[in-house]
Image (cartoon, rainbow, N blue to C red):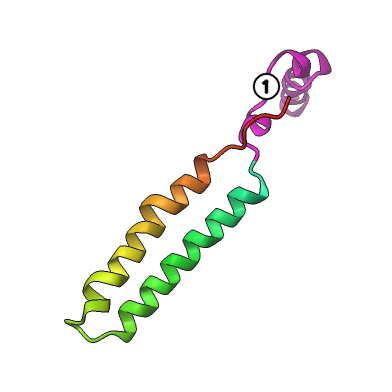
Amino acid sequence: MLVLTVQRIFAAAMSMENHKESLHLFEGWAYTAKNYLLFLVGIIFIVLGYIIMALGEVNSFQSLTIAPSMLFLGYVVIIPFALIYRDKAVK
C-alpha cells in the first residue's frame, strides 16, 4: 500500500510534462570532468601536504610553512571551488 503511494508520487513528479517545465536537482548539479579534475588536484594537495609535514623536522620551514599552506589550499580553496564550479551554458 505504502509502496504504491510512493510510486504514484514519484511518477507524478518525474513525468515528462514536469521535466520540460522545471530543472531537476540532478540536472542543475551535474559535475563535469573539470569538477572531478579539480577535486583530484585538491586531494593531491592534501596528501602531499601531509607527506611534506611528516617528512620535515618539527621546527623546519617545510613543516611550519609549506605543508600548512598546501593543506589550506586543498581544504579551503581547491575542493570547495571544485564543488561549486560550473561551465558556462552553451546555447
Residue 76: x and y in percent read 36, 51
Q: What secondary structure characterizes most of the magenta part? A: helix
Please tell me in which quadrant of the rendered image residue 48 appears. Answer: bottom left
Q: Quadrant of the N terminus?
A: top right
Determine the residue positioned at 62% across, 37% down: 87
Give the crowd class for mark 1: few <14, some 14-19, many >=20 residues within 10 Å.
Answer: few
Please tell me in which quadrant of the rendered image residue 46 appears. Answer: bottom left
Please tell me in which quadrant of the rendered image residue 30 appears. Answer: top right
Q: Is residue 46 above or below residue 31?
A: below
Instruction: Tell me which amino acid carries mark 1.
Output: Leu
Apparent side of residue 47 relative to residue 21 in the rendered image (left or right):
left
Determine the residue positioned at 54% across, 54% down: 38
Determine the residue positioned at 16% across, 81% down: 59
Apparent side of residue 82 relative to residue 61 in the rendered image (left or right):
right
Report if residue 7 lies within the magenta region.
yes
Q: Is residue 77 above or below residue 66?
A: above
Q: Nearer the viewer, residue 50 or 4?
A: 50
Q: Please name the residue that numbered disc 1 is placed on.
A: 23
Q: Nearer the viewer, residue 47 or 86?
A: 86
Apparent side of residue 34 relative to residue 20 in the rendered image (left or right):
left
Residue 45: x and y in percent read 44, 66
List the single residue furthest toward the left: 59
Q: Which residues are magenta?
A: 1-30
Residue 7: x and y in percent read 77, 25
Report if residue 70 lies within the magenta region.
no
Q: Quadrant of the C terminus?
A: top right
